[in-house]
Image (cartoon, rainbow, N blue to C red):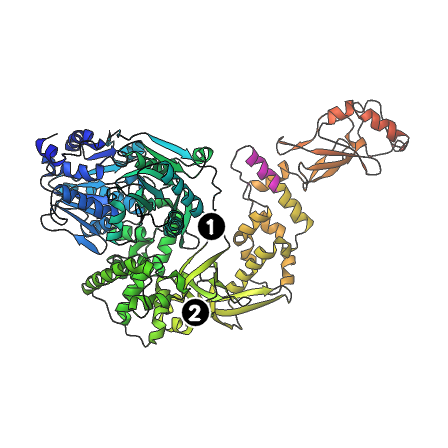
Amino acid sequence: MSNLKAKLFAGLEHLPVVDVLDEICTQLQSRDNVILEAPPGAGKTTLVPLALLNEAWLAGQKIILLEPRRLAARSAAERMASLLQEKTGQTVGYRMRFDTRVSEATRIEVVTEGVFTRMLQSDPSLDGVGLVIFDEFHERSLDADLGLALTLNGRELFGDLREHTLKLLLMSATLDGQALSQLLDGAAVVKSQGKMFPVEVIYTGVYQYRQPIAERCAETIVEALAQQRGSVLVFLPGQGEIHRVAKLLANKIGQDPDILLAPLYGDLSLQEQRKAIDPAPEGKRKIVLATNIAETSLTIEGVRVVVDTGLCREPAFDPRTAMTRLATKRISKASATQRMGRAGRMEPGCCYRLWSGSQQDELANYISPEITKADLLPLALNLLQWGINDPSELRWLDPPQDASWGQALDLLQYLGAVAVEDGRVRITAHGELMNSLPLHPRLAHMLIQGCQWGYRSLAINMALLLSERDVAPEMGADFLARLDIVNGDTPIPTSSRGVLKRMQQQRKQMSSVLDKLTLDALEPEVEPAQIPALLLACAYPDRIALRRTDSRSRYRLSNGRAAELVSDARLGVPQWLVIADMGGIEGQSHEKIYQALTLDIEALQTHLPELIVERETGLWDSAKAAFVAEKQWLVGALVVRSKPVSNPDAQVRVEALLELIREVGLSQLGFSQDVEVLRQRVELLRQLDLQSGETSRWPDFSESGLLASLEQWLEPVLAPITKLDQLPRLDIKNLLMTMLPWPLPAELDSQAPVRIAVPSGNSAAIDYSQRPPVLAVKLQEMFGSAQTPVIAAGRQPLMIHLLSPAGRPLQVTQDLHGFWQGSYQEVKKEMKGRYPKHPWPDDPLAATATAKTKRHL
């Protein structure tokens, strides 16, 4: 290590990453991509950027250090600046949404991942940047994956235009280094083994998943305080649990002056966050109640004990409903290891896990990447702005999923952000404007609309409110109550003062951003009282809701989902709502409405006509056998208004018929016996192909298969149908035969014949309604036949029902030869006296098959 580095890191030699700093410098000198694996607390976030700052290959260019969270970014910048004995904004600065401290002298910029994407959009080549460091990459956030994909693409596109190559360093505590190395063209992997002290792990017993955790957690904390020394770091899933545990601890440990309670989560003020991170005063102990924000990136001094609930709260996106809900999940084994490691930073420690050893074995090894479960709307808009029409054009560790990508494109088109031309999706001028704002695309669209209508201040307040957690959950479901708080018309809840203070700062910065944009004024004649709901509908057109006629609290959303509004005196029970916030339990049939506004549906039709779709539709009334048509105006799946149509389009009638048949089933067509036999024969041959592992040439004639292909075989003949009783008159057999391309019709008759010849010279029908198919034939007509008859080119033996002269079953077998040699003799003894006129030879294999009596023989 150079003398400069040794002086800079004096007193930090104990940090594990110090041992590999020279190797990192050497690898980056000869390579463009390097991966550093180092455990939490190794010092990588702080020391690595400083160690690389004066490397010759950097040539005086900047280093960008990416952090997944604002708190981690600010803390890292402040720590590096303090080591340089400077303030942030000099050599080391930071950038995050609505908060930037950099200057011309800044060489290291600590940047949140979302802001980095905006930097790339502004300058894809990253001119003046020599190194990008992706810190905590194992968290696999959506912004980190997107940032890496765009950085790699930008380097390929603009690499030849740069004087110096842009280098990449990915740092992580736990990741699949081999997969990442392959993505980065064989990047070198540097490993810091770490110097963690031993940590005793105590499993407290089986945790019943989804049961409240606060009481058990508080009891364990009290136990740990009594049994252990040092400060305690507690991992909880969210703010709600943090507040509940804090309240319980206040009752259990009283006002002990030597114990400090310090919550730690993203919405706290900077001062409150520092209180949690800084070491406890001499002679005092600290209990830090944290979300997984404390799992990585941050170092909390003085912690010797960890209490881990094993839970985290993460967003889960459902592409069917376009909704993201926070779900409480079990952490991975990797996360459990990282949390445990926080207790062994400076000395031996202890970790209490609120689950059992067997449950530990059941945990997944790693968390799922956010890109596989997140709302891809921001990613899609960024890729289209970048010029990428298909995500496969970029390099990903895990590519975006098709369903979520398609849903994102549909919604962007709905918002006017993209258009489809010649089969390709392109971003519109409105979409570029949306992407220039530091907001989710939904909120950016709403903000632009509000500015154009002349309600800029209101739109900013709404966008900031919708970007944050609920500032006043105790105020019921009325979103206007939150606006009153932001506007200063209602007292500020104590728990939300930090959030509101941050929003006040962000409001000024958002105004500054908007001042730089050119927005066309629309100035519609709209009642001011209607504006909030209309703006909310701009952001969430899929959350417009109509109250069900059979309920005062249940609503149906425009996206087809169901939701329930808990009684709210201020909001009442309006017929139409637009929902700002909702959620529920995974798998539940309906959501719970947390925040909403009453919507004037006529105002929506007048001022946001693009949300209304006009269509002609109809249905068949089975009871009256009549067709009813109407013209409808819809928002999503909800009918805003309708009127009868006297001369409906023929195609509307056909589509209504198809819908009726899908609902009622094929019985509406009145299939004849011949049609049923045809279906059964084809299905037999298809199933035989599938059982042998082949791709069958035979179409799917099962009920589900035919219902799925109605447009192919039935729709072409439905136009003349005007009454339901005409359906059974259709020649269904001929329609189905058209589904069999040549030479399948001939093969059907040869492989699955309707009738089959028997030894007597007659033919017998095969019953295909059973599996295996049944051949029912009189016993005497099978004399002399040692082999069981087969069909389907020998693949399917028939089940033989050997009948008495009166047509009653005597034997059921698929082994005809075995029957003659075995139980036939018993059958002969019993039947010979009952049917003396019919032959019952001693040797049936040598006898002549016949359908006649002895006299006729």
Query: In the rendered structure, which disc, 1 or 2, sits on the residue that comes first in sequence?
Result: 2
Horizontal side of 178 relative to 554 (left or right) equals left
User: Foreground: 346 or 104?
Assistant: 346
Three-letter amino acid code of the residue under disc 1: Glu
Which residue is more in the foreground, 797 or 99? 99
Say whether residue 850 is visible. yes
Residue topped by disc 1: 586
Residue 747 percent coordinates (x, y):
59, 38
Q: CA distance from mark 1 to mark 2?
A: 27 Å
Q: Nearer the viewer, residue 240 or 115?
A: 240
Q: Residues within 10 Å of mark 2 (few under 14, many from 20)?
A: some
Q: Which mark is residue 487?
A: none
Disc 2 element: loop
Confirm whether the magenta stretch covers residue 695: yes
Q: What x and y, as percent, mark residue 587?
A: 49, 50
Amino acid identity at mark 2: Leu
Where are the magenta residues, as a range? 682-698
